[in-house]
Image (cartoon, rainbow, N blue to C red):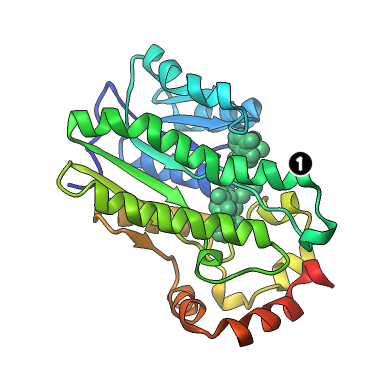
Amino acid sequence: MSLPPPGPDRAAVVTGASSGIGAEIARELARRGHQVVLVARTESKLAELAAELGEHAHVLATDLSDRDARAGLLDRIGELGLVPDVLVNNAGLSTLGPVHRSDPAAEANLLEVDVVAVVDLCSRFLPGMVERGRGAVLNVASTAAFQPLPGQAAYGGAKAFVLSYTQSLSGELAGTGVHATVLCPGPVDTGFGEAAGFERHDFETSLPSIMWVSAAEVARTAVDGMARGRIVVIPGAVNRAGAVFGRLAPRRLLVPLLARQHPGLR
Ligand SMILES: NC(=O)c1ccc[n+]([C@@H]2O[C@H](COP(=O)([O-])OP(=O)(O)OC[C@H]3O[C@@H](n4cnc5c(N)ncnc54)[C@H](OP(=O)(O)O)[C@@H]3O)[C@@H](O)[C@H]2O)c1
């Protein structure tokens, strides 16, 4: 069993649970009987979701770009009387536009949340899971992990890191009873595009409609993938084909094509 069974003192910790894919993953895990610990900055949204999910949901408002706040998370979960058997590193964001017009602080914040927090929480949560001989980690990357992404260069690089890192983790964890899965969604209609600075119309039309998968479907596929011990989960047949193309296409041709089409470079 790759996804540890739920228990009264066991919890699934979901970061970025205040909206979009993270909220749906929390709903999916709760539906399957897991207690969930909801993590993000916006406490009011976490409280709303916790009220919907009932007594088995807990709110730990945390800014994951804050290294001290991250360092305290495991103890705060312990104070709830819970052992984290499942860690979902879903919180994430993108910037938009060419690096030569970027804000250095925004780029550093992206790396802190999308990369450093993922590594930090894995380093902090995995020792206990390995010691107990059970656990599951889901790191959320993107289909952007399979090829460069001019117009969102730091985001593409960050997600490529998360993909490679999680695949390495899965190798290291073999035989420990702990499993690592990386989720690589294509486009999903959440607050993500708006937070990155896309115009709604540009975000919606940036990729063909057949590539879009709902956040609820992404969450269901992700949790099924964890339960089956899958290492890489890509929701949607078109996105799976796109990932193969993105991996194999010659960079010399692909990168200029992507740059011409990206709304952030117009
Ligand atoms: N939507 C897509 O098309 C798409 C495609 C591929 C991959 N993804 C990935 O899916 C994940 C979830 O994105 P989404 O689409 O669901 O976007 P979203 O609706 O914007 O959700 C992002 C979540 O991250 C949290 N977050 C951002 N900065 C944070 C910080 N400093 N500390 C704690 N939490 C923080 C946000 O909560 P607060 O603002 O309340 O802190 C929110 O809950 C991300 O990793 C994203 O890269 C999205």
Q: Residue 207: horizontal and vertical position, in percent?
A: 65, 74
Q: Residue furthest top?
A: 79
Q: How many marks?
A: 1
Quadrant, the C terminus? bottom right
User: Splitting the image into 4 quarters, where does residue 183 fall?
Assistant: bottom left
Which of 75 and 160 lies nearest the eye of the viewer? 160
Q: Write down the quadrant of residue 75 in the picture.
A: top left
Please, is residue 129 above or below residue 265 in the view?
Answer: above
Residue 114 locus on image (x, y percent): 57, 46
What amino acid is labelled 1 in the image?
Ala
Number of other residues with Cα within 10 Å of mark 1, as a class: few under 14, some 14 to 19, many 20 or more: few
Q: Residue 87 in the image: x percent, y percent?
A: 38, 37
Identify which residue is drawn at 32% across, 49% down: 169
CB of mark 1 near ligand 1 (< 8 Å): no
Which residue: 77% across, 46% down? 104
Q: Is residue 104 left or right of residue 245?
A: right
Vertical relation: 232 (above or below) 244:
above
Q: Position of residue 197 (x, y in %)?
A: 78, 54
Q: Residue at x 64, y 68 (%)?
A: 149
Name the residue carrying label 1: 105
Residue at the spot x=24%, y=46% of the render? Answer: 173
Q: Secondary structure at mark 1?
A: helix
Image: 157 above or below 266: above
Left or right of 161 in this view: 108: right
- Residue nearest the observer in this picture, 28 or 184: 184
- Foreground of the two, 174 or 31: 174
Can residue 220 be seen from the camera position used here?
Answer: no
In this view of the protein, which residue sits in the foreground, 66 or 203? 66
| Residue 119 in sight from this viewpoint | yes
Q: Is residue 48 above or below residue 256?
A: above
